[in-house]
Amino acid sequence: MPKSILLVDDDPETVMIVSEALAGTDFKVVQVRTLAEARSRISQRPPDLLVLDGFLPDGSGVAFIQQLRDRKLDLRVAYLSALWRDEAILGRLTGELGVCRVLHKPLGVSGLRLQIERCFEPEPVEVGEPLDVPPEELVAETPSEPGRAIPWTPGRPRPPKASNKPKAPPPPSRKRPLFAPGQPVPELGALEAQRQRLRRDSPDMRARLYDGLSDRVEELRQTLAEASQEERAGDAVLAAMELARRVERAAANVGLVNVSVSAAELRGALEAVEGGHLHLYEVLPALLDPLLLGVHAANPGERAEAPDPELHLARVLLVDDEPQTFAAARAAARQRLFALRCARSAEEAIAVARAEPFDLALVRFDLHHDQGGITAAEQLRAAHPGLSIGFLAEGWSPARRHRAAEVGAVLTAARPLTGDTLSAALRRAAANEGEPRVLLVDDDPNFTRVMTMLLGRVGVAVTAINDPERALGAMAEVRPELLILDALMPRVDGLDLCRAVRTNPAWDELPVLMLTGMSGRDVVLAGLEAGADDVLLKGIDTQELLARVRARIDRSRAARRRADRDARTGLYNRRASAEQLAARVEEARRLRRALSLALVRLEGPDAVVDAALEPTAQGLRGGLRGYDLLGRVGPATFLATLASTPADAAGRVIRRVVDAVPGQNPNDDDALRLRVAVVCFPEDGGSPEELMRAALERLRER
């Protein structure tokens, strides 16, 4: 006959785990959410096993078990514990209250099934003696208290409530506790074992548990946002306290102890807010940010889909409130070797962007509500001023495109995100360098005022200085893309200032446009000899002046984009390596010949790797042919391509070069170690991305 189990828990994640653990067994499970429902079920027909959570909406699990024992109900009870592993509590549960098992969250499917089966064994394993633990220290004074929150002082436990009741001796123990007095409770080891069990369980269930936790955290974030905007936010704060309790338990189910503790700290702070001891602005974002970041960092999908951190070609942040779109976006990013991170709100995106840099953020235009993405983009831009932002929407009207352009969007594209959209967005982000910056130095305030107005009309940001002695100091502050100087000024004239600029290596390629009120060949020659790129009369036609300014800026930007060498090694940098690799693969396809690609990665202590960068680059440059592609594609990773060379021959060449790098010892963790992976077109891949992915996989295997 099937054994009956009454599960008393209002947490859907726990219910899901128990259901999956006992599926296909001889156990019949009935689930209720409250202690009142449990009393009714037990009075009608006592179950063979009662599985009870410690904190329920209408009371304490410990107090409920005490009531059962007071009524002389000899019922098998398994107790679900979310956070604490206190030997005193364990002693009372397994001793005075006769609990047969204390099941510590996070629960694993296989482990939970075994624990439930052991509840029906005649005598569980028991050691030690009962502990003297007064009941008033364990049972909440208010039965409806959902659980003990952690006050907002991270790292300090909440002091126990004082009690004037005399400590009565405990009744005779029914069973001996699982842990004897003085015996260390295996906190860290037990938690790690729980995590290992969770990892062995179904990946689908892990994903469902994580999604449930993410939904609760997002609901908590929205509730706190509403509370911060309301004058009388008492109800919203109470709702947030309950949601924080649910997040705390859901995080414990998934094994995220740090997130669970953060939620408990947040709940403790909200209790202080509700009691009038703190203001809500003192709580946010100090406690909400760690919670959002902890959940995001634990996302199993994020970890599974992220490419190798050294070999990604770009970092992209996707902000969308429909997480079902994330999987397709990650797949598109993985195909192009992009690192993609996903966030569901502006707050989560800001927290994630604080932890790592991004090249581009793509925001859903109607995030949470129409034009909600505009607000999110403005918040992101305020927190991270240099971040390029694009928008995604299922439909684009002229009004929407105009609104996106107003906040400086580099792209407006169709939603959901595709690989082509990603590539186009990154190209636009790379090309988008903001307003051109011009430093104008002239002692005539009227002239600088007119020039500032004229250049401002064509989208040029002008910083005007009328004191030439301040010009060099302003250079470092403004970092201009064009310097406009008056040739003749008091104290320091434009010619001397131009010579000073040219002596600084940081500014030797800065375009300099010199203006003068004096005509004549000698003035023009003097300006050019001082280092100016162009010398013009102040009476020049306005349109011609604007055209010359724009041409100088455009050429300067084009030259900067062409700077494709790694400053440390002299090899191609990552961007240029990607462009060159695409050209080499296309050439090999057109000529129908082999092309081998090799990755060389340096490993060891940071100082050792740093010292080996130049010798490794020199060895590769000297050991390969002049027309072979060489690039530094990661902090400690080099790329090489060998045309018309099969993989085995390329491997021998690369290995010979690598073995000549000094300081290597593969058996010493403190010495330099070099790993090599070689793949070949077309056998291992027909595109640059496929070849890089194949080489990366082989590099990981070695």
Image (tube, grey):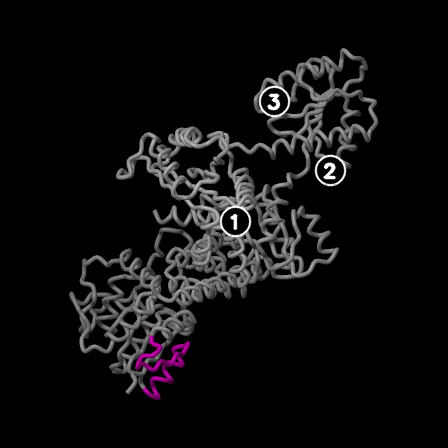
Estimate the x, y position of residue 59 in percent, counting from the top left.
38, 73
The residue lying toward the viewer, choosing from 323 and 10, is 323
Q: Is residue 651 above or below residue 329?
A: above
The residue lying toward the viewer, choosing from 617 and 314, is 617
- Inter-mark Cα distance, 3 to 2: 25 Å
- Inter-mark Cα distance, 1 to 3: 40 Å
Estimate the x, y position of residue 639 in percent, counting from the top left.
45, 39
Label 3: few (<14), some or many (≥20) within 10 Å? some
Q: Secondary structure at mark 2?
A: loop
Q: Which mark is residue 465?
A: none
Name the image quarter holding residue 298: bottom left
Q: Nearer the viewer, mark 1 or mark 3?
A: 1
Q: Which residue is tagged 3?
A: 508
Q: Earlier in the sequence, mark 1 or mark 2?
A: 2
Q: Nearer the viewer, mark 1 or mark 2?
A: 1
Q: Secondary structure at mark 3?
A: loop
- Dots 1 and 3: beta carbons under 8 Å? no
Q: Is residue 700 above or below residue 511?
A: below
- Dots 1 and 2: beta carbons under 8 Å? no
Residue 190 seen by the camera: yes
Q: Amino acid at mark 2?
A: Gly
Name the image quarter holding residue 598: top left
| Image quadrant occupied by the N terminus | bottom left
Estimate the x, y position of residue 406 in percent, counting from the top left.
70, 48
Q: Which residue is tagged 1?
A: 687
The stretch of residues the image draws in magenta is 22-45
Q: Residue at x 20, y 69 (%)?
A: 169
Q: Which mark is residue 459?
A: 2
Q: Amino acid at mark 1?
A: Ser
- Inter-mark Cα distance, 1 to 2: 40 Å
